[in-house]
Amino acid sequence: MTRIRSTNPQPRFRALPAAITAAALLTLTACGGGTESSSSPSAKSLSLAIGSAPNSFDPPQLNDGQASYVWSSLYDTLLYTDNKGQLKPNAAESWKYSADGLTLTLKLRAGMKFTSGAAVDAAAVKATLERTMTTPGSQQGLLAAVKSVEAPDATTVAVHLKKRDGSLLTSLSMAAGVIGDPATMTKKSTALDPVGSGPYVLDKSSVTGTTYVLKRRSDYWNAKAYPFKTVTVKVIQDPTAAANALQAGQINAGPASAENSAKLKGMGYKISPLNPTAVANLILADRAGSVLKPLGDTRVRQAINMAFDRAKISKQLLKGAATPTSQVFNPKGSVYDAALEKTYPFDPKAAKKLLAEAGYPKGFSVPMPGFVYTKAFEPTVTQALEDIGIKVKWTPVPAQNNFSAISSKKYPLILFLDGLSTSAREAGNNFAPDGYLNPFHSTDPKLTKLLDKARGELDTAKAVASYQKVNEFAVKDAWNSPIAFLGNSWATKGVTYLGDGSNTFSTIRAFGVSD
């Protein structure tokens, strides 16, 4: 049995993806790739539906899920990831690592301004990064490798690292890389109405938690990348209501499930299918057995993996718009290994045998947090585990308590829907001691060595072999019990969806004007 140690550093976690249901599949995690539209700015508007409201606009608390459709319109990020998943310049025109990989130097473009009129400079970048580094929140852990930040002149930022971090550039293209206004960033008003340097401002007609109306800035430095003068983001949690809004013409971009795609297409909507953009993952969090002793035995975790009929779940519960999996790494990436999918066949009888061998012939009980997005999955998960002798008690968790529930160590098993990303971020989030999906801070000597080697390699191609070994270890030692990759399609009319699934970050740069 693999020995797993538990450490207890400062809890770090990222915001939860938005709520998801089987009928909508990926209403809330169908994140799009970003690229400049070839269309010139026009009077056309974009109105789209998302499944839950942004939790905050305060930089350390930003959510990299669908809330980023709003905040990424209000803030500039240092870098951005284009439609093909490639890192590109944004607020930083260029970047370069030192020979030892321990200093990242960013050169900012000149002429950027916050909506207050203040200049966007290196001091602002330094202030934002330092605040994110020192403020507990959803982004803090992504800057854990940063030792200090310097601003030697107005357009130069030097990020000094404690150790090499191959995922840092990706983080700087998302919420950890936003630039806030130092003069207003710490004010309470920032959580609801921030001062940013992005292409849009939040209109006064917006209703927090319901509707976010974004007006394009006339003086934005990269206006050609944003062809819509007005963007309206509506929070519609019920997938049926979102489909009705499309049919009624209240929005011109929204999720298209397998059940309503044909009808929407007949109404003139273009249906743009996506590759998987998220994974439904049962996190076997208490791998040391500190709260639930059985989970400290690898055989128990392997038994849980054998309890799920992933193919049936993907076909029936998820309506065929899902792919069964036992891995958390993006199936489009080079770390994913199709051979590993044969590790855990659906076999309740064999699962019961493993539990008996581990000393639990009568099974055991386990508490699990019930989030908004888990409701559609709860009956299936409950039944699958009960069939091998594990009884689940779900505890409803209000949305505002999601973070505290995950990090509380009250729940040894957690059902989580996570957006797919780069291999470095997926590995760090799930398996690093400070990863937000590793709330018990589990470690293993072999895994630690593999992670350190992979994360220390700045050339992503050279890091692939190490991440592949991380994936193999995590699957065979059953650190989690992933169930399915989730995908969905966008329905659009009058606008076009530009993404192809290569980039899972939610940004309105994934939409353009139809010809």
Image: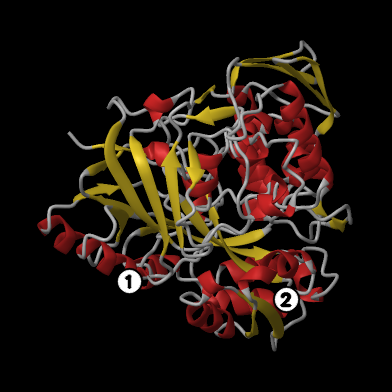
The residue nearer to you, when weighing 282 against 96, is 96
In the image, what residue occupies the spot 80% across and 69% down? Answer: 409
Left or right of 298 in this view: 302:
left
In the image, what residue occupies the spot 51% across and 70% down? Answer: 373
Is 358 placed above or below 365 here? above
Left or right of 308 in this view: 408:
right
Kindly tell me whether residue 296 is visible in this rendering: yes
Is 499 placed above or below 189 here? above
Q: Residues within 10 Å of mark 2 (few under 14, many from 20)?
A: few
Q: Secondary structure at mark 1?
A: helix
- x and y, in percent, of residue 281 in the image: 56, 61
In the image, what residue occupies the spot 46% across and 38% down? Answer: 503
Kindly tell me whether residue 14 is visible in this rendering: no
In the image, what residue occupies the spot 58% across and 35% down? Answer: 115
- Residue 241 is tagged as 1
The residue nearer to you, when weighing 119 against 449, is 119
Q: Residues within 10 Å of mark 1 (few under 14, many from 20)?
A: few
Kind of residue indicated by mark 2:
Glu
Kind of residue indicated by mark 1:
Ala
Left or right of 213 in this view: 329:
right
Q: Secondary structure at mark 2?
A: helix
